[in-house]
Amino acid sequence: MQPPPTRGMHSDVEVAAQAVVLTGKRELRQEEICAADVPPDGGWLTVDACGMCGSDWSRYALRDVPAPMVLGHEIVGTVSMLWGSLASRHDLAVGTRVVLEEAVSCLSCALCRSGRHRLCRSSSRYGATAVERAPGLWGGYADAVFLDARAAVHRVPDGLDPVLAALFIPIANGLSWIGEAACLRPGETVLVLGPGQHGLGSSTAARRLGAGRVMVAGRDGDEARLAAAVALGADTVVNVDRQPLGEMVLDLTDGAGADVIVDTTPLSTSALGTAVALAAVGGRIIVAGAKAGRASPIDTDVLHRRELIVRGVAARESRAIDAALAWLASEPGRFEPFGGLTVGLDGVEGALLALGGEANGDRPLHAVVVPRGTR
Amino acid sequence: MQPPPTRGMHSDVEVAAQAVVLTGKRELRQEEICAADVPPDGGWLTVDACGMCGSDWSRYALRDVPAPMVLGHEIVGTVSMLWGSLASRHDLAVGTRVVLEEAVSCLSCALCRSGRHRLCRSSSRYGATAVERAPGLWGGYADAVFLDARAAVHRVPDGLDPVLAALFIPIANGLSWIGEAACLRPGETVLVLGPGQHGLGSSTAARRLGAGRVMVAGRDGDEARLAAAVALGADTVVNVDRQPLGEMVLDLTDGAGADVIVDTTPLSTSALGTAVALAAVGGRIIVAGAKAGRASPIDTDVLHRRELIVRGVAARESRAIDAALAWLASEPGRFEPFGGLTVGLDGVEGALLALGGEANGDRPLHAVVVPRGTR
Amino acid sequence: MQPPPTRGMHSDVEVAAQAVVLTGKRELRQEEICAADVPPDGGWLTVDACGMCGSDWSRYALRDVPAPMVLGHEIVGTVSMLWGSLASRHDLAVGTRVVLEEAVSCLSCALCRSGRHRLCRSSSRYGATAVERAPGLWGGYADAVFLDARAAVHRVPDGLDPVLAALFIPIANGLSWIGEAACLRPGETVLVLGPGQHGLGSSTAARRLGAGRVMVAGRDGDEARLAAAVALGADTVVNVDRQPLGEMVLDLTDGAGADVIVDTTPLSTSALGTAVALAAVGGRIIVAGAKAGRASPIDTDVLHRRELIVRGVAARESRAIDAALAWLASEPGRFEPFGGLTVGLDGVEGALLALGGEANGDRPLHAVVVPRGTR
Amino acid sequence: MQPPPTRGMHSDVEVAAQAVVLTGKRELRQEEICAADVPPDGGWLTVDACGMCGSDWSRYALRDVPAPMVLGHEIVGTVSMLWGSLASRHDLAVGTRVVLEEAVSCLSCALCRSGRHRLCRSSSRYGATAVERAPGLWGGYADAVFLDARAAVHRVPDGLDPVLAALFIPIANGLSWIGEAACLRPGETVLVLGPGQHGLGSSTAARRLGAGRVMVAGRDGDEARLAAAVALGADTVVNVDRQPLGEMVLDLTDGAGADVIVDTTPLSTSALGTAVALAAVGGRIIVAGAKAGRASPIDTDVLHRRELIVRGVAARESRAIDAALAWLASEPGRFEPFGGLTVGLDGVEGALLALGGEANGDRPLHAVVVPRGTR
C-alpha cells in the first residue's frame, strides 16, 4: 500500500481536495476545497471509503443547514501526512490505514477525560462541521480529510477491504448496544425494530454474542432488508404491515416477551410503546432511532411492574470499534448481505436519495462512497 | 418479650382474629375472622405494627374491590405458633419478631428461583389476597396474620421498636432504588419528585449512600413533608407550585442536571418528562410512582443524546430489608421526622383518609396501625 | 415417552432402585436401595442419563468417604411420580423430562432466598448425600432418584437426546463463567487452562458469546482433548509440556495478554500465577479448578498494576442451565466433539477410572451413565 | 487569591524553581531547577500544597533511583502561566487552583482513550519523572510544577484550604475502592487492613457510602492511627498484635465474615490469606498495598466455595477526585483526625522519615509539604 500523493500544496502541509459540499437543504455541490489555516498539529488522510449513514440523508433532506459542510462520518482513510505532535505518535505513520470516530475529544471535560467524548458537545465532529472551520475538510465525502490531533483513530487490520471496513459504525454500534448497553445474557431473546443498517448491525451482533432467538421487524418496502436480516442470522422476520407483531413475539416466547428490544426506527413515536408491551420481565429496551424531537407515550406502570429498563444510546464506546474491525477482518464473507451500493463523489446525491427511499428501484441497505474509485 | 396467646382456637392451629376488612370501594368493616382450612405447613404472627402504604389508600378509595380482603403489607409481627415444616426452621421460633415481604414466593418459577419473587404473579401477596383464600388472614390490619411457609421473613433486630420497624418498606425501597437500581456513585446529585414516605425514604437513603446534593420536590400542601425532608438530610426542597423547579436544579448543578432522579409522584404523567429534561448526561431516572395505567410522554431523542436510563422498580431485592432494619436499629433517632400517626384497628379508616389528604389538618407522612395498642 | 413403572413399592410412594453405592475410598458396589421414610412432599425421577463429573472421580479415588452415598449430580430424568405439594406444581407432571441442579435450596437463608442456593451449605446436594438420609436415593448413578420438593428443576426441551442433555452442567458452567463471572466483552481474547469438560465448556461458550481469539492449554496426554477443543471452535491450542505458553499468548495478543483466563486445572497450584502473568490490563481470571486446599502463590503487585480481577466460581446461576439446554437442543451437532463414553450402571467404575486417566487407552473427555440402557 | 510571580524567567515561559531532588537512595538535595526546553503547549502551577504518599517514602528509602527526580504527586497548585493550546482551555486561567492526577494521558492508546490513563505506562507521571525530562519540574516537592497539556486537572472548590485539599488522593481512592471497585451495597460490613492514610481513606469512605459495621485493623505502634480511625467513623478497631482479628471479625458478623475487605498493608504477604479467610460468601477483597513483588499465598478453593472476588486497584477513576474535593469542601471538620504534619521544602526529608516510622515520636498519619509556607 503506498500513500497517495497530496495535491495542490500551498505550503508544507496544505492540500486541496475534491469534496461534496452540502450548501443548503437538498443542495449538494462538488468543489475543490483548499485547506487554509492548518493547525500546528495534525495530519491528512486520503479517504479510501466512507459509509453513508441514515443521518446523512436526514441532514441532506430534512434539516436546515447552518453553514456549508462536507458530510460523511464513517471514514476509512490512509495517512498521507503527519505534522506537529502527531508526527511522533507511535500508532500512526504515513501509510497507516485507520478509521475515525466522529466525535473529536475536547480532552478537558469530565466526559472526554473518562472516554465518553461521544457525549461531549464542545468539540468538532466529522461529517458535521462547517467548511469555514479551518482547515475545512471535516467530512468523508471528499478525497482527503483532516486528521485532528485529538481525533480517536483505530487501525484497520491488514487485509481488510476498506469498503467492507466502512461498515465499522453499524457493526460497532450493534456490538455496543447489544453487548454493553443491553447487557445481553446467554440465550436471551432479542427483538430489533427497524431493518436498516443499524437494525441489522444489532441483529447480527445479537447472533454473535450468544442470543437465543433473534427477531427483526420491518414494514412494506423492507422485503430485501428483511431477507438480508435472515441471511445475517436472524431467526424470525416480521413485516408489521402484514403480520401481527405482538402475537408473533408472544407466541415465539411462550408469552414471556423479548428480553432485549432495540428500537432503530426513525421517526416512529409508537415504537417505544410497542417495545414496552413486548418486553419480558427484567427486559431492556434500547432506544436508538431519532424521532425529530417528538415525544413517545410510555406506560410507566408496566415499567415498574416488570422492572424494565429503557436506555438511550449515542454512538458507542471506543473499544467496540476495535471489536468490529477485528470481526469484519476475520469473517468478511459473513457481511455480504449488507450488500453495498458503491459510488464515487459524483454519485453521492443519488445514493442519498436511494437510501432515503426516494429513488426508483430497491432501497439499498448500505452505501459507501469511494472518492478515488475502487481498486 | 412473651408471645401473645392465640385466641379462639378451633383446632390445634386455628385462630380467630380481629381484622379490618375492605368489602368494597370506601367500605371497611372490623370483624372477627375465624381461620379455617389451615394449610399443613405454616405459622401465626401476632401483628405488632403495620405500616400504611399509599397504595392502601388507593385500594380503599380508587380501585374496584374484587373480593373482601384485609389490607396492610408492611407487617411487623411476633411468631406465636409454627407447625409442619416451619416448626423445624432454624431461623424461626415462637417469640421471634419478624417482618414479612409482601410477595410470597411460588418457589418454582424462574423469577422466584432467582430471588425475584417480587415480580412473580402466580402466588399470594400480603395485603392483597382475598379473605376467602384460606386461612383468610393475609393482611396486617388485623391482630394476627398467617405465616405462609413460602413467605420471606426477616428477623427484627433486638431492641428495635416495632412501630419504628414498620418503616422497613420505605427505607428498604429507598436503599434499593438509590443504591441498586440507580447505582448511585459517590458525590452524585439526586432529585426526588414527591415527598411522600417513598420519596423521603429515597432522599434519606441518598444521603446515607454518599450522594452530593439531595433535592426533594413537592407541591402546595406538602409543606410539612418538605420540612421533614430537610430534617432527614435533604439539602434543598422545592415547592413546584411556587418555585421554578427546572431553573433551580440547573442553577444548583451548574447547568449539568441531576445524576439520579426518582419519580415517586402518584398519577402525575408529566413527571417523567420533567425528569428527562433535568437529568445530567449518563443520568438514571427511577420510576416508582403508579400512574393508573396512563401513559407519560417522553422525548426519546434526549434519552440517546444524553445516554439516559429510565428504570422501573417494583419493591426491592430481599437484602435491602435487612439493611433497612439494621439501619433503623442503629440510628433510631434519625427517623423521627417520619413522625407517624399511630392508630388502633378502629382508627384505620381515619388514617387512610388522612394519608389521602381527605381529612382535616395536616396530611401525615407516615401512619402505623398497632392492632393491640402500643406498649 | 411413557414413564417407567416404579418397582418394589412398599407403600404408595416407596420404590426400590438399582444404585451404585460408594462405600469407601475406591469401593463401589451396585445394590438395590429400598426407599424408606419418604417425605410428605416429593417425587421420583427415572434417571435417563447422568453425566460424570471430574469431582466424582475425586470423591471415588482421593477423598475419605464419610458415609455410603450414590454419586452423580449431572442428572437427566423423567418424572414417574409426584405427591404432596409437588403434585400441584404447574411445571411438573408425570412424564416430564427434567434436569436437576445439584444444590437443593433450604428456602430460608438469605443465599437461597436470593437465588444463590449453590452457595448454601445447610441443605442436601445430589450426588453428595448419604444413603442414610431418607429416602436414600440422592444420586444419579442409579435408575431412580428422589425429587426433593425444594430441588431446582429445569425442563428438557422436547427432542433433546437425554445423553446429550447430560452435558448441561459443563455447558451451563461455561456460559456462566465466561458470560456472567468474567463478563466477556465483544472481541476479547480468552485463554482456558485445562482441556477437560469444564475447560471445553468454557472455550465453546467463549466462542458462542463473541470472543475474539480463543486459546486452550493442555499437557501431554491431552492430545485428543485439544483436538476436540479445536473442533469445538478454539483458534489455538497449546501443549504446555512442549510449547512455551507465555510466549505464544503474548505473541498472539501483540504483547497485551488475555482479557479473560479460566483456570479449570485440577490440583495445579501454579496455574493462578501463570494466569496473572498472562492477563491483559483489566483482565479477569476465573478460578474453577479445585486444588485440594493447597495454596497458590500470587504476585498481588501485578493485580493492582493491571487492575486484574480474580474470581472464584461455584457452579452457576440457575438461568444458565436453561440457556445451556436451549443451546444443546438448537445445535446438537456442534457438541459431537465432546464424544461421550456411554455406560450402564455396571460400567460406572471403569468409566471413573478412564476419566481419571487410570485406564488403558484414551482418556475420554466426557462420560455418561445410562442406568437403564440407551434406547 | 493572586497568582504568585514566576521567578527567574529565561524566556517568555521559562522559570526557575526551588525543588527537593531525590538523587539516590536516601539522598535528597534542595536545589534550584531552571526549566529548559519548555514544550510548545503547557503551563506553570505554583505549588500550594503537596500530600506525601507512603510510596514516596518507599522511593526514598527502599528503591533504586534510576535518575534524579522530584517526588510528590498529590499536588495542589495555582495556575501562574498558560501557553500554547492550554491558553484557550475554558476550564483553566491564571489564578485557577487545581489538583493534578499523577498519570498524564498519552491520548493515543486504548487505555487513555477510555479514561484509564492511570494504567498507561507510556507517558510521564508526576512525582516519578526524571529531572532530565524537559522541563524538569515534574514533582510537587518544589515551588512550581509543569502543567503538561495532557495532564488531568480538577478544579479545587472555592474556599477549600489547599492543605486540606492535599488529602484528595487518599479520599478519592477510598471512595473509588469502596464504591466502585468493591461495589459496596447498603449495610454491608467492611474490614480495612492497615490504618495508614489509604486505610483510613477507605474506612471513612465506607462510612460515607452506607456501610454497616466498619472495622480497621492495625499493629503495635498504630495506636494513634487506630484512634483516628474511630474519630473518622470506624465502629471497631483491632490491634492484631494484641487481639485475635479472626475471632473478632467472625464474632461481630455472626460468623458470616466481612463483605468487603481492603488490604492496604505495605509488604505484608499474609494479608491476602487473612482476607480470604475472613470474607463472607460473595465477598470482595480489594488489594491496594504494594508488596515489592513478593507473592502472597491464597487458598483458591475458598475463592470458589464462597465465590469471592479479589481485585487489584491502581489509583482511581477520574471522577472520584471531583467527589473527594466536593466532600472535603462540604465537611472540612470531618477530616481533622487526619491531622497532618505540615512542612516546608526543608522539612521534606524529616517528614518522610517520620512517615516511615524512622523518626522519634508518633508516626504521623498524613503529612503535607507547603513549599512556600502556610498563609
Image (cartoon, coloured by chain):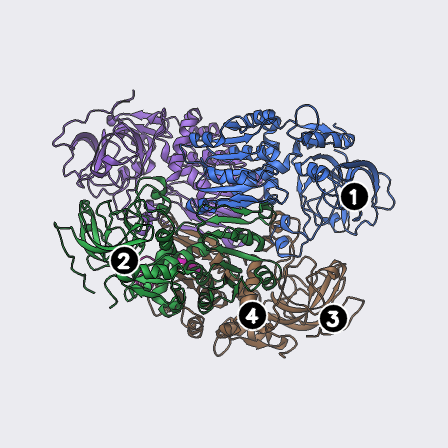
Chain colours: A purple, B brown, C blue, D green
Q: Are marks 1 and 2 on the same chain?
A: no
Identify the residue at image location x=55%, y=62%.
Answer: B323
SS type, badge 3: strand
The CA distance from mark 2 to mark 3 is 71 Å
Q: What residue sits right under mark 2 in the picture?
A: D98
Amino acid under disc 1:
Pro
Residue B329 disc label:
4
Q: CA distance from mark 2 to mark 4?
A: 42 Å
Return the residue nearer the eye: C229 or D99: D99
Q: Tell me: D276 left or right of A226.
A: right
User: Mark 2 and mark 3, same subunit?
Assistant: no
The residue wearing badge 1 is C68
Give the label, 2 or 4, closer to the camera.
2
Q: Which residue is mark 3?
A: B16
Provide the chain ID for the residue under circle 3. B
Residue interval drawn in magenta:
B246-263
> Disc 3 marks which amino acid?
Ala
